[in-house]
Image (cartoon, rainbow, N blue to C red):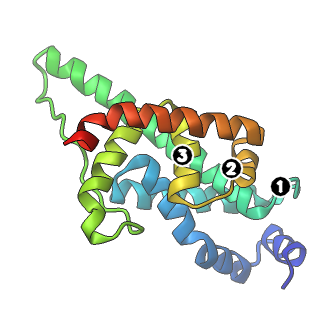
Amino acid sequence: MNDQVFIQSLQQGDPRAFRELVETWQNMVYNTVLSIVQDAHEAEDVSQEVFLQVYQSVRHFRGDAKLSTWIYRVAVTKALDAERKKKSKKRIANLRSWMGMEDKTDELPHFEHPGIALEKKEKAAILFVAMKQLPENQRIAFTLVKAEGLAYDEVAAIMNITVKAVESLMHRAKENLRKLLKNYVNS
């Protein structure tokens, strides 16, 4: 089935086409979301939200971008929304703790990214913690290029920016990560 016929099947609500979409893109969506939210359970929930959003919105898909680009956009947006909600909840919990209403927990969530070899897990965990400190656009560009292996032009389409802007974001992300990780590299 070619892309146009597949998209039309999705837009007409064909359950087989949607099942194929999920089977084809579930790992990509999960890995992308996991790289951003850094919590396996939350990544599963957000991934389900991504496919729900795709299912509900596919009728409005105009084909201006590739289907995969659109799905990446939805995944990144949903993951960032989850991050914002988590930060908001954390601020409220910190305020409640400060006011003596609740215990404060500052533990970082433990997660294992499926694309990382066992012997590299400790270094990857340090990298992911450092990535959390990057500005949002740098983190997204870096995640899509380095964790997902996408080309700069694909990242530009997903983020709706120019390739030059992606290059700039990647350069700044690498510089910021070098600064954040210099203690680990020197030890």
Name the amino acid type tagged 1: Ala
Is 1 displayed left or right of 122 in the figure?
Answer: right
Check disc 2: other Cα within 10 Å, few if <14, some if 14-19, many if 20+.
many
Q: Of the two numbered discs 3 and 2 on the same chain, state the one appearing first in sequence.
A: 3
Any part of residue 161 in sight: no
The Cα atoms of the two marked residues, 2 and 1, are separated by 12 Å
**Residue labelled with disc 2:** 155
The Cα atoms of the two marked residues, 3 and 2, are separated by 9 Å
Above/below status of 173 relative to 14: above
Name the amino acid type tagged 2: Val
Any part of residue 143 in sight: yes
Q: Of the two numbered discs 2 and 1 on the same chain, state the one appearing first in sequence.
A: 1
Q: Quadrant of the N terminus?
A: bottom right
- State the SS at label 1: loop
Residue drawn where x is 73% and y is 45% of the image: 156
Direction front: furthest residue: 186
**Residue labelled with disc 3:** 142
